[in-house]
Image (spheres, rainbow, N blue to C red):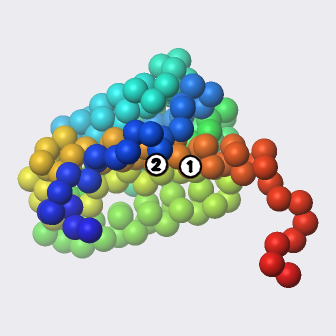
Amino acid sequence: MASSIKNLSTYDEKNIPEGKAFNIGIIVSDWNSDITHALYDGCFDTLIKHGVEEKNIRTVQVPGTFELPTAARLMLSRSNVDAVICIGCVIKGETKHDEYINHAVATGITNLSLTSGKPVIFGVLTPNNHQQAVDRAGGKHGNKGVEAAVTALRMADLHKNYKENEPKGRIGF
């Protein structure tokens, strides 16, 4: 459903796992900082709201969105995190730079999540203009940072529970 229809940051709090046992990393881009820092605030507050202890949230800032996958890789290799949330904002400009950056970052985050075996969350806005970014960073369409935090908690819980309850043998064959 398109975000122009409603606030997409509303969710059923009963379906969010308790975060007390999780260590969560957040990587936030400084480029478009008015937007990314608002996303970070929504993300951080949501993690705390759902029980993640402040001491178990590790935050790293990077210059731009392009640097998110590299910083996430470093965090995964040198920290004991259950999930990493990547927060950035690439606003469409007069050239195609946004397409190249967005594609590279999405591919990098996806590949990192698959190869590391841990959830790496894409919390990157890709709006056409600054107002669309504002609308999604605490404005009329909610805060995508909240959604990234909820996704991280759900995926960290899935990762933990799947490992603990991993089926033995083959399924379906």
Residue 87 relative to residue 54: left or right: left
**In the rendered image of this protein, does residue 135 appear above or below residue 13?**
below
Q: Which residue is mark 2?
A: 151
Q: Tell me the amino acid under the disc marked 2.
A: Thr
Residue at 49 percent of width and 66 percent of height: 107
- Position in image of residue 67 (x %, y %): 43, 49
Residue at the front extreme?
14
Q: Tell me the amino acid under the disc marked 1.
A: Met
Disc 2 versus disc 1: distance between alpha carbons? 6 Å
**In the rendered image of this protein, does residue 8 appear above or below residue 169?**
above
Residue at 87 percent of width and 71 percent of height: 170
* Quarter of the rendering occupied by the N terminus: bottom left
Residue at 13 percent of width and 56 percent of height: 132
Q: Residues within 10 Å of mark 1 (few under 14, many from 20)?
A: some
Residue at 35 percent of width and 64 percent of height: 102
- For the question of whether residue 61 can be seen, the reply is yes
Badge 2 vs badge 1, beta-carbon distance below 8 Å: yes
Tag count: 2
* Quarter of the rendering occupied by the C terminus: bottom right
- Position in image of residue 111 (x %, y %): 58, 63
Q: Nearer the viewer, residue 73 or 131?
A: 131
Q: Which residue is mark 1?
A: 155
Q: Nearer the viewer, residue 156 or 123?
A: 156
- For the question of whether residue 67 can be seen, the reply is no
**In the rendered image of this protein, does residue 81 appear above or below residue 91?**
above
Residue at the bottom extreme?
173
| Mark 1 element type | helix
| Mark 2 element type | helix
Q: Nearer the viewer, residue 105 or 165?
A: 165
- Position in image of residue 169 (x %, y %): 90, 66
Residue at the left extreme?
131
- Position in image of residue 81 (x %, y %): 62, 35
